Amino acid sequence: MLRETLSVMRDFRRLRAIARILMYYGWGDIAERLGKRSWIRRAGNALNSEASREIMALPSEVRARLALQELGPTFVKMGQVLATRPDIFPPNWITELAKLQDQVPPVPFEEMLPDLEAALGKSPFEVFRDFQSTPVAGASIAQVYQAKLQDGTPVILKLRRPGIRENIDADLRLLAHIAKLIEAEVEEVRRFNPSEIVEQFSKSLKRELDLALEGRNTERFARNFLNDQTTSFAKIYWDYTSDGVLVMEQINGIPGNDLVQARQAGMDLPLLAARGADALMKMVLIDGFFHADPHPGNIFFLPENKIAVIDCGMVGRISIDRRNEIADLLAALVSRDIDTLRDILITWAGNVVVDEAKLGADVDEFICTYDNAPLKHISFGVLLNDLTTIMRENQLSVPPDLTMLFKALITLEGLGRQLDPDFQIVSHLTPFVKKIIIDRYMPRTLWRKGSRGFGKTVSAVSELPGDISQVLKEAGRGRLKLNLDLKRLDHFGHQLDHSTNRLTMALITASLIIGSSIVMTVRGGPELFGLPAFGFLGFFLAFVIGIMLMVSIWRSGKD
């Protein structure tokens, strides 16, 4: 608790700025719900009331988006993550949060130059030929510049903005603190594990800050697609790359968002959509390592209807078990297997109490909606929205590792439909799903699973006597411990501290009154207003402490 308090105090100025923005956009009730004190209310009252009335006329989801946009890069990216959680937010909120743009004014090159020189060891104008100091692209974390190597090879330099790491670290500390407060105080959102969401988000954002890691991700994708002649990735130049600078091959192709130029170049747009979908399906279901942000700006169209993928900072990982669950979900949808589909949703939700009868009825209605519909005619976005609606209504939540996957699939489906109006991503899932299901029952797979299970069983049985002996020894010595994870224990301890402090102050007040009464009966010594000075001062101090105690009790009742 002390460490968390010191962390909040260190970021106090940023916390006040966050509170001011939340109050301005009409979210002061969040601060009240979290038990914040009067300084937040005073900050809110100091704002322009005319602007506040105009803001309050906007829908809640719009006010939330505007607040996140003003709070800066960390909160914009957090909003983009929350836009992938239809199990938490209704469709109108998801639509609004999806509008969040990770765009900020470019930083002047003079401010970027010191960090670039420190990373390269000398001036970029000495290291590169034709270095262009005007950025060709940029976002909240990094800006992109063009240059040439000394041999004339065109390259792209991605340079992290100065001071961005410190700002993001401060915001992440505050987000973690706020998430813990929400878990302790707001019971209805506790099931969504806010702390886990923030933790996963923090890891992802810190990975994006490491541009050398983006380079390693790019090379890993290149190795995975080594035998695929239709999909390529940029070459990384490690002699110039570091944590804050990424130097890579310049891709000369048609940007994925320039469909007019692609048509004029005679490209087969439906084929490009199919190849992009197949590439992502391979990443997800075969490699278990996928590009988590395949929007048009991160894709280039190359001659012969090939594609190139850039900006590999945001990636996702998916385990074999998750891949099998996705395959089972689609298979259950086709075969109308209500029990399997229900069990998968419960597995995704984790350790929660579920009304299985209601969930089963909702799943049955969901399956009937898609009865006799070929997979190729099913929109993944609509299917996902229906599934997450069921989860939200049954108080289930989607695991964080799946939210990034769903975001990637929906983003790709949007791009695919721009290229081909008849594009359906589910139809591209089908062959990969069939392969997973067939491989699951291949003799080599069954043998591998059986061998692994047999080995674990033998190991557990051989260790059982030792484990029992250890438990009996600890019990005999009186050192057997039982660890309990009690929810809101920290909050209970905080309240107990408050109560103890008040009781202590009350005892001190009572002691002062009794002691001062005794002193008043003794004549002699200094006087004040004709009364013994020490007795008078004792009564006065008891009066002041009593008033403070009453105000504290009144405030706690109000909060």
Image: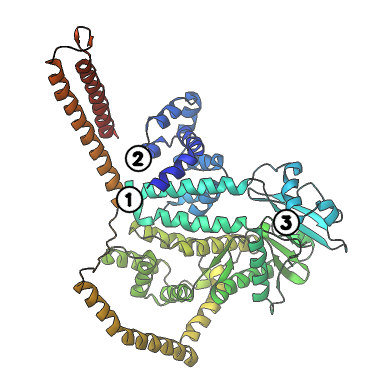
* Furthest residue in direction top, as rendered: 530
Whole-percent x, y for residue 92 in the image: 46, 48
Kind of residue indicated by mark 3: Asp
Q: Which mark is residue 258?
A: 3
Mark 3 or mark 1, earlier in chain: 1
- Res. 382 in view: yes
Mark 1 or mark 2, earlier in chain: 2
**Between 218 and 116, the one nearer to me in the picture:** 116
**Between 531 and 324, the one nearer to me in the picture:** 531
Residue contact at pointers 1 and 2, CB within 8 angstroms: no
- Which residue is painted at 27% across and 57% down in the image? 486
Quadrant in which the C terminus appears: top left
Give the alpha-carbon distance from disc 3 to disc 1, as whole Å: 44 Å
Badge 2: residue crowd in 10 Å (few <14, some 14–19, many ≥20): few
Give the alpha-carbon distance from disc 3 to disc 2, as whole Å: 47 Å
Q: Secondary structure at mark 2?
A: helix
**Between 20 and 254, the one nearer to me in the picture:** 20
- Mark 2, residue position: 33
Question: Which mark is nearer the camera, 1 or 2?
Answer: 2
